[in-house]
Every structure is written in structure tokens, then in C-alpha cells.
């Protein structure tokens, strides 16, 4: 069982215990006092739960984030006075990753409305949001705000929280990414766009490699009257099309895109028996060719055998064909999705002994272990660093800034993805209405799926992998 599954299991167990305790208390209250009081309180308690306690947050909001960065990147002398951040004598090119460590303490409103830190300058403001009830060390992303920072006109103010003490600034100077050949490894159609549309759409040369067809969980297509197997096959064909067609929106030609057609949530089983074919869970297929049919590239796995060895052969062929200088793939420890973990493992194995090696490997996280709302806040806001409670590792974040036009293009790319188009379940839509009214949360203007809020931001955040 993965760490995220363990945390979710514990969360659900604790929630059941809490609900049972509350139910017993209400019954006793009804028996001993007024019989009608539980009938009144039950719906109010449910509304309160949906408004303020429905987030999957598997750590305490009062815990410190703990990051250890590369030695020598801290800039001493930064000060915050009257809301103005100053660092005399700082010289920056403007493309550095800038991280500001602050101590936050929320007020009483910050327990009901999302607290955050507002960054203001003449070029425009940003609001980076944190957990309700926040009390501890957090890390803001100032990337893209270098001119205002150097000129001493960047304001930093809390919303529903206070900043305590003096902050610490870390300047991480990164290699130029946009003048490189970039290959994005996407476990599923839309992963490349969620994590790296801004990067690959601006790179001198970009390749998109999608490992799976993403054919499972096809209930939306069953509502059209299709049997489960036919619905899964239709969904897989659609997502295979998406993985090849949507990058054209960013100017990536089809001959630099590959859909490998392996089956969703079966990569781990493939890796455990590398030479054995592993069938789709829901599409009743033991052949990847229906999902590879639109490829223009000839690859070793075109015999249709869904095996780990074929996946590695495909990746080796693509790596030698593209010779990417930068490989972008799921982060090995931040992103817990089983297919994302296996995608990274497959790339590492494929590179072993290969004559071509990349200059740089970047990790991304479209999912988190500890917080299903990260990046917190609204579409268009900056991406603060995710929760990290253990400082045993050294981290090297790499942040790319996206202007408004690029954010709009990214939103449209996500809107073309069939998996992000169906309407969310009724309960989720009702929860959003409650949170909008009581918790002040707003949805994304680009679409109902939660990934529009999470992914269409002023930053794309990566991590340099050693």
C-alpha cells in the first residue's frame, strides 16, 4: 500500500470515528433534552464539514515546512519593514527561482477563510494561499518578481494571517531551459500539459511521450449507453488522440509526439514481470495497437505486446531519436500516483547504459501525498512550495513564469483534454457551492475540473533531479 493510500485510510478511519462520536452525542442530546435538536443540528454539521473540514490534509496546519536548499543560495540581509521587502545591492538577471521563507500565524478569520500572503508591485499582484489555521514556516515563490524585489518596491502582506519576524530569501540560479531540446514524459494524456505546457510550448524543440492510454474509469461514456468494455476502449482512443493532437496547439509537430498505448494502472504489474504481457483492467485488451494507431513513429513496441520490456525498448528508441537535453518526468518522491512512480522508474532504467544521456532531469508533481488541494489558491496565482515536513533531503526548485497569454493558452489546451471535460459529481458541485458561500473559495473561470484551478498558474514548478 502506498504512503498516500495509508494516509487516506487513516484519514477516513478518523473521520468515521469522529462522525460516530458526534452522532452518539446528538442522540443522547435528543433523548436527554429536546428530541428535535439533533434533526436541526445534523444538516448544520454536514454543511460545516463540507465548508471547512472536507479537504484531505494529512498533516497539521501548525507544522513547519522544512526545506534544505543547495549551499550558498541564501541571500543574507533581506528585511521586511512596514510591508516592504528590501535587500540592498541585490543584482538578478530576472530568470532565477526566488524563494522567500516566512513565518505565518493566522488570525481567527484564517480558520474559516483561506489565509495567504499578498505580493504587490506595479507589474501586478499575486496571492499565494496556505492551509486554514496556518501557524509555522512556509515558502513563497517570488519568481518573476525580480525587478520589484531588486528595486525595493515589492510589498508582502498577510491576508487573514500575520508575518512574524524576518524572512529568509533563497536565490537559485538555474540553467536556461527554453533554448534546449526538451522531452516531457507523461504517464497519461494531460500530464504533460498540467505540469509543463508553459515549458514545452516555449522550448526550442519539444517531444511529448505519453505512456498509457488512460482508458479506465469510463463511467461518463457508459452514460451514453455503451457497455463498460466499449466505454473503456472509446475513452482510451480519445485520450490517445488528445495526447497527439493537443501538443499541436503549442506548435509541437505530430512526429515529435508518441502515444505508447500501455494500460492505465498496470505499469507496476508490468514492472514486476518484465517479459509478461499485462492486460487492460477494463478494456478487455491484451494488445496496445488500438491506442498506438495514430503514431507516425515506428517503435519496437509496435507488435502490441503490453510488457515492461517493450516499454523500455520504446523509451530507449525515443531517447536516441530525440536526444533530449532536458527530460521532464514525475518526481520520484513527491508524486505518489502508481503510474507516475513507474514512469520515472522506466525512464531511469531506459537510460542505463544508453549512449545518450540528458544534461538535466526535472521532476514535477501533479499529485501530492499530503494535500489534495496543492497548489492552493485560485487560478492565475503563484505556486508556493508544497508541504515538506522532513529536511533530510536537499531540494533544488526550478520555477518558470507564465504570463497571462500563456496561461490562457494552457487553459485552452487543458480544455481540449476529454478527461477534464465531464461535469464533476453532484456532491462535489454542491460542496463547491457551500465553500463559495461560507469559505470564500472561487472556482476556476476556465472549467469545472479541479485541475484548471491547480494548473493554470503564473508559475510551473519543477525540481532538479540528481
Image: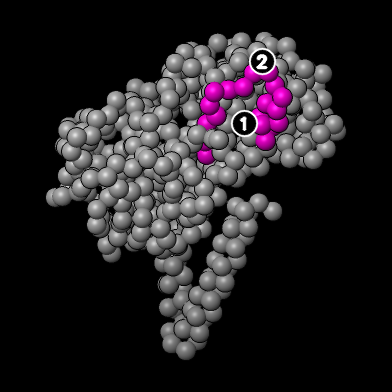
Residue placed most toward the observer, 247 or 227 = 247
Q: Position of residue 164 (x, y in %)?
A: 25, 58
Which of discs 1 and 2 lies nearer the camera? The answer is: 2
Residue 228 higher or lower than 317, as above or below: below
Residue assigned mark 2: 320
Quadrant assignment, res 235 = top right
Q: Position of residue 269 (x, y in %)?
A: 78, 40
Instruction: State which region is magenta.
Output: 345-365
Q: Residue at x 39, y 55 (%)?
A: 131
Q: Is residue 109 visible?
A: no
Q: Residue at x 77, y 17 (%)?
A: 300
- Number of labelled discs? 2
Q: Residue at x 33, y 48 (%)?
A: 101
Residue 374 higher or lower than 16, as above or below: above
Spot the residue most to the left.
82
Label 2: element kind: helix
Q: Is residue 292 magenta?
A: no
Image-based side of 273 in relation to 328, left or right: right
Residue assigned mark 1: 188
Amino acid at each position: 500500500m502506498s504512503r498516500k493510500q495509508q494516509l487516506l485510510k487513516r484519514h477516513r478511519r478518523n473521520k468515521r470515528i469522529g462522525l460516530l462520536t458526534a452522532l452518539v452525542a446528538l442522540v443522547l442530546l435528543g433523548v436527554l433534552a429536546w428530541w428535535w435538536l439533533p434533526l436541526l443540528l445534523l444538516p448544520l454539521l454536514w454543511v460545516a464539514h463540507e465548508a471547512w473540514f472536507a479537504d484531505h490534509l494529512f498533516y497539521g496546519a501548525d507544522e513547519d515546512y522544512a526545506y534544505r536548499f543547495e549551499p550558498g543560495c541564501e541571500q543574507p540581509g533581506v528585511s521586511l519593514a512596514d510591508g516592504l521587502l528590501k535587500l540592498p545591492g541585490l543584482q538578478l538577471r530576472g530568470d532565477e527561482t526566488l524563494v522567500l521563507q516566512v513565518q505565518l500565524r493566522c488570525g481567527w478569520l484564517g480558520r474559516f477563510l483561506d489565509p495567504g500572503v499578498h505580493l504587490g508591485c506595479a507589474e501586478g499582484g499575486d496571492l499565494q494561499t496556505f492551509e486554514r489555521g496556518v501557524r509555522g514556516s512556509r515558502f513563497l515563490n517570488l519568481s518573476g518578481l525580480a525587478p520589484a524585489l531588486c528595486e525595493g518596491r515589492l510589498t508582502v502582506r498577510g491576508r487573514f494571517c500575520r508575518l512574524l519576524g524576518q524572512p529568509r530569501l533563497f536565490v537559485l540560479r538555474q540553467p536556461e531551459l527554453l533554448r534546449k531540446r526538451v522531452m516531457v514524459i507523461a504517464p497519461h494524456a494531460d500530464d504533460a500539459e498540467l505540469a509543463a505546457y508553459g515549458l514545452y510550448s516555449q522550448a526550442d524543440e519539444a517531444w511529448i511521450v505519453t505512456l498509457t492510454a488512460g482508458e479506465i474509469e469510463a463511467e461518463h461514456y457508459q452514460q451514453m449507453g455503451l457497455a463498460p468494455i466499449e466505454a473503456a476502449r472509446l475513452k482510451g482512443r480519445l485520450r490517445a488522440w488528445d495526447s497527439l493532437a493537443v501538443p499541436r496547439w503549442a506548435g509541437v509537430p505530430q512526429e515529435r509526439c508518441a502515444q505508447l498505448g500501455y494500460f492505465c494502472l498496470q505499469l507496476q504489474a508490468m514492472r514486476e514481470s518484465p517479459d509478461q504481457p499485462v492486460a487492460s483492467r477494463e478494456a478487455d485488451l491484451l494488445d496496445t495497437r488500438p491506442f498506438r494507431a495514430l503514431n507516425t513513429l515506428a517503435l519496437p513496441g509496435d507488435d502490441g505486446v503490453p510488457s515492461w520490456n517493450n516499454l523500455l525498448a520504446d523509451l530507449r528508441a525515443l531517447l536516441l531519436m530525440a536526444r533530449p537535453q532536458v527530460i521532464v518526468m514525475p518526481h520520484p518522491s513527491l508524486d505518489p500516483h502508481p503510474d507516475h512512480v513507474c514512469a520515472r522508474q522506466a525512464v531511469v532504467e531506459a537510460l542505463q547504459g544508453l549512449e545518450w544521456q540528458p544534461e538535466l532531469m526535472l521532476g514535477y508533481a501533479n499529485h501530492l501525498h499530503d494535500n489534495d488541494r496543492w497548489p492552493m489558491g485560485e487560478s492565475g496565482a503563484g505556486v508556493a512550495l508544497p508541504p515538506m515536513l522532513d529536511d533530510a533531503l536537499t531540494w533544488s526548485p526550478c520555477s518558470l513564469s507564465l504570463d497571462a497569454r500563456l496561461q490562457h493558452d494552457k487553459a485552452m489546451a487543458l480544455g481540449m483534454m476529454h478527461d477534464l471535460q465531464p461535469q464533476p459529481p453532484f456532491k462535489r458541485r454542491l460542496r463547491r457551492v457551500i465553500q463559495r458561500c461560507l469559505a470564500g473559495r472561487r472556482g476556476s473561470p476556465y472549467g469545472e475540473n479541479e485541475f484548471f484551478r491547480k494548473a493554470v498558474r503564473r508559475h510551473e514548478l519543477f525540481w532538479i533531479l540528481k
